[in-house]
């Protein structure tokens, strides 16, 4: 049949037929292999959505801002600013006290160095002057200055007497070393 040298279009092109057959084959294989897992996953996803939908919607929508009395808001902000200012002033006074104590300690150390230098020039022992000065007791202070100053250690007696010599073997106790037995081991 000829209609003006035109051909009639085919029912479906071969590419569409191949593509639909391929799609049916892959989807059918996937569903037959993993169908129960896909169904179970969909059910679990639905249950999770139902359970947490309120939480998710509240996270996505912004919370409405409560507008209170403007005078109350201003008073609250002023109270917060005043409390911050008081705390800053207190911190500044503590810092000034700490700096003053540090200056006094530095001056005392400088004075002791000068005294020890002068006594050394006179021929005296410079360590004697340091020992004669009484140790200063730390005054009760805030936690910041207490952490900076080391605590004095109490006087302790030595663990061993002055005549102890480990090379002589004297003064040992129950901790003496003894050589092992000679001969073969008594294994079986």
Image (cartoon, rainbow, N blue to C red):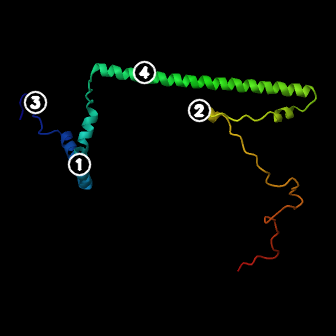
Tag 4 near tag 1, CB within 8 Å:
no
Which disc is residue 119 wearing? none
Tag 2 near tag 3, CB within 8 Å:
no
Counting residues from the start of the chain, the first of labels 4 and 3 encountered is 3
Counting residues from the start of the chain, the first of labels 2 and 3 encountered is 3
Which disc is residue 6 wearing? 3
Gap between marks 2 and 3, in whole Å? 105 Å
Q: Name the residue under label 4.
A: 81
Gap between marks 2 and 4, in whole Å? 25 Å
Which of discs 2 and 3 lies nearer the camera? The answer is 2
Counting residues from the start of the chain, the first of labels 4 and 1 encountered is 1
Q: Mark 1 points at which residue?
A: 47
Tag 1 near tag 2, CB within 8 Å:
no
Query: For the residue carrying disc 1, how many other residues have a C-alpha within 10 Å: few (<14), some (14-19), or many (20+)?
Result: few
Q: Looking at the image, which is closer to me, 30 or 15?
A: 30
Which of discs 2 and 4 lies nearer the camera? The answer is 2
Q: Mark 2 points at which residue?
A: 142
Q: What element carries label 2?
A: loop
Which of discs 1 and 3 lies nearer the camera? The answer is 1
Query: For the residue carrying disc 2, how many other residues have a C-alpha within 10 Å: few (<14), some (14-19), or many (20+)?
Result: few
Q: What element carries label 3?
A: loop
Counting residues from the start of the chain, the first of labels 1 and 3 encountered is 3
Gap between marks 4 and 3, in whole Å? 91 Å
Q: Looking at the image, which is closer to me, 169 or 153?
A: 153
Q: Residue at x 23, y 41 (%)?
A: 53
Counting residues from the start of the chain, the first of labels 2 and 4 encountered is 4
Q: Position of residue 13 (x, y in %)?
A: 17, 38
Does the image show residue 181?
A: yes
Q: Position of residue 71 (x, y in %)?
A: 30, 19
């Amino acid at each position: 049949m000829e209609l003006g040298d035109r051909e009639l279009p085919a029912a479906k092109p071969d590419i569409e037929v191949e593509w639909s057959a391929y799609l049916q084959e892959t989807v059918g294989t996937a569903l037959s292999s993993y169908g129960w897992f896909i169904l179970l996953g969909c059910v679990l996803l639905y249950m999770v959505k139902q359970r947490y939908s309120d939480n998710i919607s509240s996270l996505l929508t912004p919370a409405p801002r409560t507008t209170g009395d403007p005078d109350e808001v201003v008073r609250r902000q002023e109270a917060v600013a005043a409390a911050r200012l008081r705390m800053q002033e207190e911190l500044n006074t503590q810092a000034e006290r700490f700096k003053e104590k540090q200056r006094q300690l530095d001056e005392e150390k400088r004075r002791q160095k000068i005294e020890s230098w002068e006594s050394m020039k006179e021929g005296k022992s410079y360590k004697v002057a340091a020992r004669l000065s009484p140790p200063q007791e730390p005054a009760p202070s805030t936690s910041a200055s207490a952490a900076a100053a080391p605590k004095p250690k109490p006087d302790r007696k030595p663990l061993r007497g002055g005549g102890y010599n480990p090379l002589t073997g004297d003064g040992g106790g129950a901790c003496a070393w003894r050589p092992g037995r000679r001969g073969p081991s008594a294994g079986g």
